[in-house]
Image: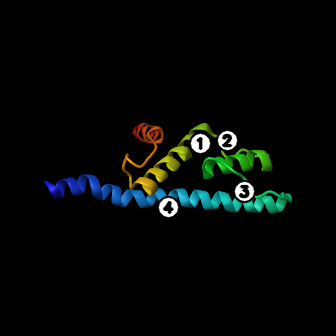
Amino acid sequence: MFAHRFAEDVLPRFFRSPILVALWAIYESGTNEIADYLQKQGGHRIGLRDIKGNSDFDRMNKYFERVLGLPLITDAPAREHVELLLLLRNAIAHGNGREGPVNPNSWNKTILGAAC
């Protein structure tokens, strides 16, 4: 019984979770590098790190739209996938994939989004 539960519940979370966290880190660092490059090329005095926001993704959106004059993401389905990736990353990083430590609205959106 214990081995079955371990194989069904723990192992998948153990192997999938680091991948999702790494995917978000790759997206975030790539976006930061692009923002830094465009800041230097465009001669912008304000950098991505100077922008305030509710989340890193919110700051990225604000910076690209308001400072660089470019949309961060132009495709609505792609935006939804990136937002879902961020929610999953936060659920893993801040709650070990468990519901308790995660904001209930974010949890419901994560679970409903992941189920689709």
The alpha-carbon separation of the residues under discs 2 and 1 comes to 8 Å
- In front here: 41 or 66? 66
Q: For this view, does 31 lie left or right of residue 44?
A: left
Quarter occupied by residue 35: bottom right
Residue at image mark 1: 79
Q: Earlier in the sequence, mark 2 or mark 1?
A: 2
Q: Earlier in the sequence, mark 3 or mark 4?
A: 4
Alpha carbons under labels 3 and 4: distance apart? 21 Å
- Camera-near label (3 vs 4) is 3
Residue type at mark 4 is: Ala
Residue at the farthest right position: 43
What distance separates the C-alpha of mark 2 from that of mark 3? 19 Å
In the image, residue 89 sits, relative to residue 75, either above or below, namely below
Task: Give the labeled residue for mark 4.
Answer: 22
Labels 3 & 1 near each other (Cβ < 8 A): no
Label at residue 74: 2
Disc on res. 48:
3
Residue plotted at (68% across, 46% down): 61
Dot 2: element: loop
- Secondary structure state at the residue bearing disc 4: helix
> Gap between marks 3 and 1, in whole Å?
19 Å
Q: Give the residue type that dot 1 points to.
A: Arg
Position of the C terminus by quadrant: top left
Question: Which of pointers 2 and 3 lies earlier in the amino acid sequence?
Answer: 3
Q: Nearer the viewer, residue 58 or 73?
A: 58
| Disc nearer the start of the sequence (4/2) | 4
Marks 2,3: beta carbons within 8 A: no
Q: Look at the numbered discs 4 and 2 and tell me whether their residues touch, using CB distance below 8 Å.
A: no
